[in-house]
Image (cartoon, helix red, strand yellow):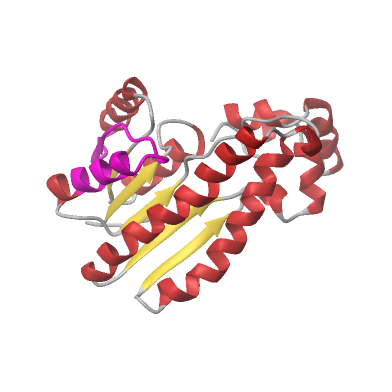
Amino acid sequence: MPLERFPGKVALMTGATQGIGLATARRVGQEGGKVVISSRREENVKNAVLQLRSEGLEVSGIPCHQGKKDDRRKLIQFAFERYGGFDSVFINAAVSIHTGNLLTVTPDTLQKTFDLNVKQTFLFIQECVPLLEKRGSGSIVTTSTAGANDSGMAFLGKDIQLYMWSKFTLNGMCYNLSRDCFNRNVRLNAVLPGMIDTRFYHGGVDSNLRRRHLSLMGLEETDLGAR
């Protein structure tokens, strides 16, 4: 018998039209949840909604740039208009716009990376907690990376150190903020995925190092599977 952990629950998601976000939206829908997906590009949202609905899932969507307060407000309002609110939030949108040595990072790139990956994520959490508390309870999940905390994984992403730095900061923020959320009956967690076969992953991890790492674990590229 298939699991059904989210019957009647509404999940609000950013960065949910491809990769980990899309797979998460699919799984929540398969387990009885109603899903509101979003990403920056309207075409991507439309395509993802059509794809998931064709699989018989309860899914709606709206474009949302997670780094823009007005877009987040529209996303929240959309969920209220469509479903009367939401029970969980999956914050998956992030940027990785620098490759190479950290000492070559420009102030503008540093600001853009930490603004979306940390600051705007915090502000979105801050905006959602009172709404979840009013609903009685809720859950917020952010996407980090195993490379931010695990030195055994970190070398794989040696070219995206700025991204991993921002995610390490995100982990610390969620750890500290989770206690304040808990006192308002809201769970806050950061998930730290390892190697998952997505376009983002292939764009930021050195292919030779990846293959060597997999070999040491007795795996091949095909063992990862598209997720």
Residue 211, percent from left and from top: 81, 31
Vertical order, 195 against 31 (above or below): above
Q: Quadrant of residue 161?
A: top right
Q: Nearer the viewer, residue 224 or 117?
A: 117
Q: Quadrant of residue 85?
A: bottom left
Vertical order, 45 against 82 (above or below): above
Q: In the drawing, does residue 208 fall left or right of residue 200? A: right
Q: Nearer the viewer, residue 172 or 33?
A: 172
Residue displayed at 19% across by 46% down: 77
Residue 5, percent from left and from top: 35, 59
Residue 177, percent from left and from top: 50, 68
Tell me where the magenta segment starts and ends, as one range: 55-79
Residue displayed at 62% across by 33% down: 109
Q: Nearer the viewer, residue 126 or 188?
A: 126
Let me know if residue 181 appears in the view: yes
Residue displayed at 61% across by 33% down: 108
